[in-house]
Image: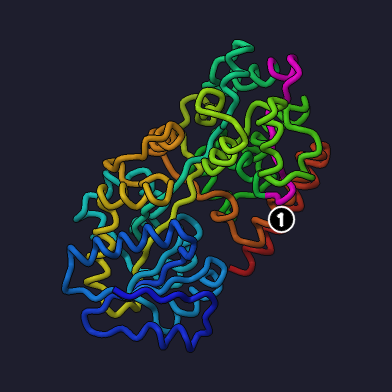
């Protein structure tokens, strides 16, 4: 087994490094940080033990270098396996014919059941195009001690959520903290409101550019958002805070909730919160009876359509979806395994996230992964502007329609 570090590569360097030999499996991977690299080394070692006849060569890229290189190496001389993301983020490569249909791997390995929570996000035109190995949940992180002190039950639906916000506000606690300085946190709120108002299929069509932002069903999303923005349920001056800076009001007890990903737990605990004062709950139901889909950015592996060793590549994909492998892998990553037969680390937040995602009706990748990059930038700028100036809502939505039209014309 050989690992090659590739921070930023020229196309010629990539081609030289990927000259596959018979019986050799070449993998391009974008996990250059310590935990991803350590965990993937473990995976390769385990795969080698199970397949001693396969010589594995893996190239490690930094994230940004990988994003700019993948189209080049998929076009010119692709590896046998490459890392990428689920959902609309993989759609351009599927539609361009760069990824191999791996529906047979899913069928033979039983992944339609054990990886069911990500089945929709891995499916295009009825076929599977890769295998997921890790994700993390989004939801509402909250101050358990403040809720208990004020007698607030954990909200299960929108009416209870608004009631919790009112009680907090009436008692001098800002209901929701958020830092929108870098925009993307607004997308987490938008995603959840849309998923709970309109559902997973609608959300996918919207982010795919098939539904206008001025559509009455999107207006209903902003009607619900109005119910949080107009009473002042978010912290003041949120556009001046990063997501990390917005943790402070929650730590200090000045705010009580944060719509965020599970990566917020570590800094909140480092700042002094504990399992007794910090809790997590699933974003509440809005449209009664609508199946609950979740935001859970999912990392995946794929077989390039022009790979030279597809037989061993399929063995690798079948291997990495196994529950025991995903258990070990995610223990090192500190994230959630996708296989619903895996074991989750003994952490209440990971345990809660695993339960929520295992029962999810669909997995959204997050607005800026599910949407065209130009549209995502304009969308998140519009969401931030709306949160500061809700009276500009109609103007913002019309502007987003125009951006969407330009993006669609380029497709």
Residue visible at 29% across and 65% down?
Answer: 44
* Magenta region includes residue 179: yes
Residue 168 percent location from the top left of the image? 69, 18
Number of on-image labels: 1
Residue visible at 56% across and 24% down?
Answer: 277
Judge left or right: residue 279 versus residue 321: right
Vertical side of 307 occupied by 235: above or below: above
Vertical side of 172 occupied by 78: above or below: below
Indicate the quadrant containing the C terminus: top left, top right, bottom left or bottom right. Answer: bottom right
Q: How crowded is mark 1: few (under 14 residues within 10 Å), some or many (20 or more)?
A: some
Residue 319 percent location from the top left of the image? 24, 59
Figure coloring? rainbow
Residue visible at 74% across and 48% down?
Answer: 181
Q: Which of 263 and 400 is in front in this view?
A: 263
Q: Nearer the viewer, residue 172 or 3?
A: 3
Please provide the residue range marked out in magenta. 167-183
Residue 99 percent location from the top left of the image? 38, 69
Q: Is residue 223 visible?
A: no
| Residue position marked by numbered label 1 in the rendering | 378
Vertical side of 96 occupied by 183: above or below: above
Judge left or right: residue 119 versus residue 108: right
Q: Quadrant of residue 187?
A: top right
Residue 370 percent location from the top left of the image? 54, 54
* Residue at the limit of the structure toward the top, as seen here: 151
* Magenta region includes residue 165: no
Residue visible at 27% across and 69% down?
Answer: 313
């Amino acid at each position: 087994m050989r690992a090659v570090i590739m921070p930023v590569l020229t196309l010629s360097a990539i081609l030289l490094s990927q000259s596959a030999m018979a019986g050799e499996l070449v993998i391009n991977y974008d996990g250059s940080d310590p935990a991803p690299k350590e965990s993937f080394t473990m995976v390769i070692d385990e795969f080698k033990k199970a397949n001693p006849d396969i010589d594995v060569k893996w190239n490690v890229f930094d994230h940004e270098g990988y994003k700019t290189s993948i189209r080049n190496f998929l076009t010119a001389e692709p590896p046998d396996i490459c890392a990428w993301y689920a959902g609309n983020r993989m759609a351009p490569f599927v539609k361009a014919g760069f990824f191999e249909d791996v529906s047979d791997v899913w069928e033979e390995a039983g992944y339609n059941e054990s990886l069911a929570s990500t089945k929709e996000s891995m499916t295009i035109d009825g076929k599977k195009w890769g295998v997921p190995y890790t994700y993390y949940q989004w939801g509402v992180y909250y101050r358990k001690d403040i809720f208990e002190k004020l007698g607030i039950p954990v909200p299960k639906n929108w009416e209870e959520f608004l009631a919790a916000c009112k009680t907090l506000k009436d008692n001098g606690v800002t209901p929701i903290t958020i830092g929108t300085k870098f925009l993307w946190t607004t997308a987490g709120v938008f995603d959840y409101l849309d998923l709970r108002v309109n559902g997973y299929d609608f959300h996918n069509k919207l982010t795919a550019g098939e539904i206008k932002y001025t559509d009455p069903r999107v207006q209903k999303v902003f009607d619900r958002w109005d119910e949080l923005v107009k009473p002042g349920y978010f912290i003041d001056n949120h556009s001046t805070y990063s997501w990390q800076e917005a943790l402070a009001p929650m730590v200090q007890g000045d705010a009580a909730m944060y719509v965020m990903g599970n990566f917020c737990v570590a800094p909140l605990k480092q700042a002094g919160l504990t399992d007794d004062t910090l809790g997590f709950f699933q974003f509440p139901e809005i449209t009664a009876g609508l199946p609950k889909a979740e935001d859970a950015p999912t990392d995946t592996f794929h077989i390039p359509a022009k790979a030279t060793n597809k037989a061993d590549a399929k063995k690798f994909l079948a291997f990495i979806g196994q529950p025991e492998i995903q258990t070990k892998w995610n223990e090192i990553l500190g994230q959630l395994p996708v296989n619903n037969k895996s074991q989750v680390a003994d952490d209440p937040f990971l345990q809660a996230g695993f339960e929520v995602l295992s029962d999810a009706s669909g997995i959204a990748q997050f607005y800026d992964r599910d949407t065209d990059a130009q549209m995502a930038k304009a969308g998140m700028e519009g969401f931030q502007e709306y949160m500061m100036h809700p009276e500009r809502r109609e103007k913002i939505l019309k502007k987003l329609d125009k951006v969407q039209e330009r993006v669609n014309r380029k497709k």
